[in-house]
Every structure is written in C-alpha cells, then in structure tokens.
Image: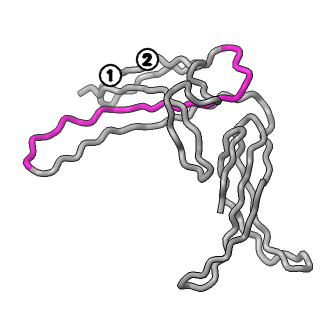
Amino acid sequence: EAVQVTIRLMDWDRSELGENRYYEPGSQPASCASKLTVFPMTLSIEAGRAEDVRVSLADGVDTSCHSLLFVEMPPPPAAASRGAKITYNLRYGIKVYAEPELAPSGEIVSAEVRTLQGSAGRVDTLDAVFRNTGLVQAIARGHVEIRREDDSVVARIPVADFPVLGGASRRVQ
C-alpha cells in the first residue's frame, strides 16, 4: 500500500536555551525559503521503495541562510473503536544550511556562578552566554577550569558541544 508524503518548507531558529522554534517560510531574516526549490512537494511511496526529492539552491547566494524541510505522513485511518482514540502523524525535520566559506567566530558575553542550596547540600552552577559573532553556524566546544587562588587547576570539566546560528546567542549551564 502506498503512503502519501508531503514536504513543507519552514523557517526555524534556536532559542537561547537551544530549543528549535518554527516559523512560516520567508518570515525570518536568515531564511533560505525564497532561495530554495523543492521538487516534488508531494509523493506517493510504495512500501519498501524509495523516492528522490530534489532540493536546489538558487545561484548567487552570498550570505548565510537556513530553513527546514518537514517531511510528513498523514495519520493512519482511524480504526472502528468504542474506546479512546489516538491519532498521530510522523514528521521528520531536515535542516538546510547555505553558508559561505567563512570561519566561525564567537565570544562568551557573560558568565556567572550561582550557588543553590538544596536537599543534597550546596550546588554551584556556571551560567554562561556564548554569542556567535560570525555569519555562519558555529559548533562551540570547550571546557571549564576550576582554579585555586594560585592559578593551579583543581578540575577541568568538559562542556558538551552545542550549535549556535550566525548572530545568535546560546545560554549554557
């Protein structure tokens, strides 16, 4: 049995906490929506088969942009039932980036140690904001060093890698 698949173009970005946010195509300043062509936008795919979708970027794109392709399948037909019903549809998001060959750049714009008192005792948390000062997505990598007054290292704590879109900020703890 064939499955109907629809492809929708959307804009997206990340909140300062790293959560994806979705918008209408062409509504965000860094949108690729007007520069992308997707064909076909609807497909009928037989079980066990694969189909190609062509995604093309217009010539002459000289600045960074990003969009998202949602590949969606409609909910399955509802079965006859007297009880509660659950409907769902499968949706996959494919991020599309168009970026000139530029080196990423960024800076830590704030850092603060917060001390919380909990049932397990005192907990110190570092709250930092990284700002991507460049035009392309950056993958921030690093570690936090805990030092004594004499500048000797007490501990080195790795920070998990995190992506930051060009011109955006990301808060990490």
Colour approach in the figure: one colour
**Displayed quadrant of residue 159:** bottom right
Residue at 67 percent of width and 40 percent of height: 165
Location of residue 65 in the rendering, given as x and y in whole percent from the top left corner: 65, 29
Quadrant of the rendered structure where residue 76 is? top left
User: Majority secondary structure of the magenta segment?
Assistant: loop
Query: In the rendering, which numbered label is found on residue 124?
Result: none
Q: Please name whichever residue, 150 or 115, is drawn nearer the observer in this view of the structure.
A: 115
* Measured Cα–Cα span from mark 1 to mark 2: 10 Å
Specify the farthest residue to the right.
Answer: 150
Say which residue label 2 marks: 40
Q: Mark 1 points at which residue?
A: 44
Q: How crowded is mark 1: few (under 14 residues within 10 Å), some or many (20 or more)?
A: few
Q: What stretch is highlighted in magenta?
A: 59-82
Look at the image and say whether residue 6 sits in the magenta stretch: no
**Contact (CB < 8 A) between labels 1 and 2?**
no
Q: Which of 60 and 48 is in front in this view?
A: 60
Query: Can you give x and y, in whole percent of width and height, for residue 100 in the image?
Result: 74, 27
Q: Indicate the position of residue 124 as horizontal and vertical percent values.
A: 67, 75
Location of residue 173 with respect to 114 vertically, above or below:
above
Magenta stretch: residue 61 in it?
yes
Quarter of the figure with the N terminus: top left
In the drawing, does residue 83 fall left or right of residue 126?
A: left
For residue 152, what is the image quadrant?
A: bottom right
Secondary structure under tag 2 reads loop
Q: Which amino acid does label 1 sit on?
A: Ser
Amino acid type indicated by mark 2: Pro
